[in-house]
Image (cartoon, rainbow, N blue to C red):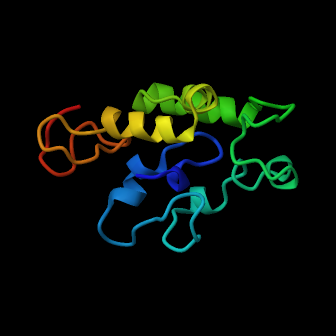
Amino acid sequence: MNSKLIAPCGMNCGICIGHLRDKNKCLGCRGIDENKPDGCRKCIIKSCPILKENKMLFCSDKCEKFPCTRLKNLDKRYRTNYRMSMLENLENIKKTGIKKFVKSEQKRWKCPKCGELLCVHRDACLKCGEKR
């Protein structure tokens, strides 16, 4: 896991099923579009003109619309379905910096049984089956 796997919206692509799978591995939002699911390839947040025009790494970097409706809706869906918040992630990045955030994510998403990275989209470790 590294800082290049943290998307502009605050999603940690390192814990996404697309990145963790063995076949057709996705390289994350900041990587090439090959092997990405359609939703990621066509992501409106990733291709936000404000983000691009102002060369911002994250939505929370001085955007006057932060948090926009799209980001709020995405955050709500992830909080409800996966117990993870992009808005919290962005706040933590702003507060502690990207390096500390990535370090804390490595601890937070580590399987207590086998030590592999957990997937945000699954309730159990992909490697050993331990419930999270």
Residue 2 sits above or below residue 78 on the image: below
- Viewport quadrant of the C terminus: top left
In the rendered structure, the answer to whether residue 131 lies left or right of residue 101 reads: left
In the rendered structure, the answer to whether residue 125 lies left or right of residue 62 reads: left
Please state the horizontal and vertical placement of residue 116, each as a whole percent of the image: 22, 48
In the rendered structure, the answer to whether residue 7 lies left or right of residue 124 reads: right
Residue at 30% over, 42% down: 122
Toward which corner of the image does residue 77 lie, by quadrant? top right
Please state the horizontal and vertical placement of residue 51, each as a whole percent of the image: 79, 48
In the rendered structure, the answer to whether residue 31 lies left or right of residue 83 reads: right
Instruction: Give the camera-side residue of 32 and 71.
Output: 32
Residue at 64% over, 30% down: 94
Please state the horizontal and vertical placement of residue 112, each as a whole percent of the image: 17, 34
Residue 77 sits above or below residue 125 on the image: above
Toward which corner of the image does residue 119 lie, by quadrant? top left
Toward which corner of the image does residue 29 lie, by quadrant? bottom right
Q: How many marks?
A: 0
Residue at 72% over, 39% down: 59
